[in-house]
Amino acid sequence: MGRRILVLHGPNLNLLGQREASIYGSTSLEEINRLIKEEADKLGLEVTTFQSNYEGRLVEAIQDARGKYDLIIINPAAYTHTSIALRDAILAVDIPVIEVHISNIYKREAFRQKSYIAGVAVGQICGFGINSYLLAIRAAAKIIQGEKGV
């Protein structure tokens, strides 16, 4: 393998730039994916992005990542707070995962402050807008290089 990263975007993230700009900003998912690719290119990483509104498709993407990717970055969106299936898929593949959120989920409604993913992720980055993704790409590069205490 080498330096391959899979970036997964959960439900409703296909509507970024069109919904709740006060929370999620005005940047579209296509633009975010372009910025992710630019950042990954700078760091010598190969990146694949995938978005789905369907939990099962995200689970399958995680399962299919085994043997193909060195790290997964996931913004599980609303599934953060509900999906044991995503958590179990992450545990099953034994690939390091970074959880990402555009907003600070801990400053939002109480139900959004529980993450089923955080406990099985290497780390969580939230609250930095679209820069959360770019910070995760930088952390991924360090993790893949074997650096501890990124």
Image (cartoon, rainbow, N blue to C red):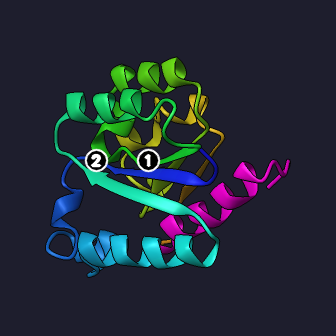
- In the rendered view of the protein, which quadrant contains the N terminus? top right
Using the image, determine if residue 59 lies above or below residue 2: above
The magenta region covers 130-150
Quarter holding residue 64: top left
Q: Is residue 14 visible?
A: yes
Q: Residue at x 58, y 60 (%)?
A: 136
Q: Amino acid at mark 2?
A: Gly
- In the rendered view of the protein, which quadrant contains the C terminus? bottom right
Residue 15 in the image: x percent, y percent? 16, 65
Q: Residue farthest to the right?
A: 148
Q: Amino acid at mark 1?
A: Ile
Q: Report if the CB atoms under discs 2 and 1 are less than 8 Å apart.
A: yes
Residue 134 in the image: x percent, y percent? 54, 70
Residue linked to disc 2? 10
Q: Secondary structure at mark 2?
A: loop
Viewed as shown, does residue 42 lie left or right of 64? right
Using the image, determine if residue 12 lies above or below residue 26: above
Using the image, determine if residue 53 lies above or below residue 125: above
Residue 129 in the image: x percent, y percent? 44, 72
Q: Residue at x 48, y 27 (%)?
A: 90
Tell me which label, 2 or 1, sits earlier in the chain.
2
Which secondary structure class fits the magenta region best? Answer: helix
Q: For the residues marked 2 and 1, what is the alpha-carbon distance in whole angstroms?
A: 8 Å
Residue linked to disc 1? 74
Viewed as shown, does residue 112 lie left or right of 121? left
Q: Residue at x 52, y 42 (%)?
A: 69
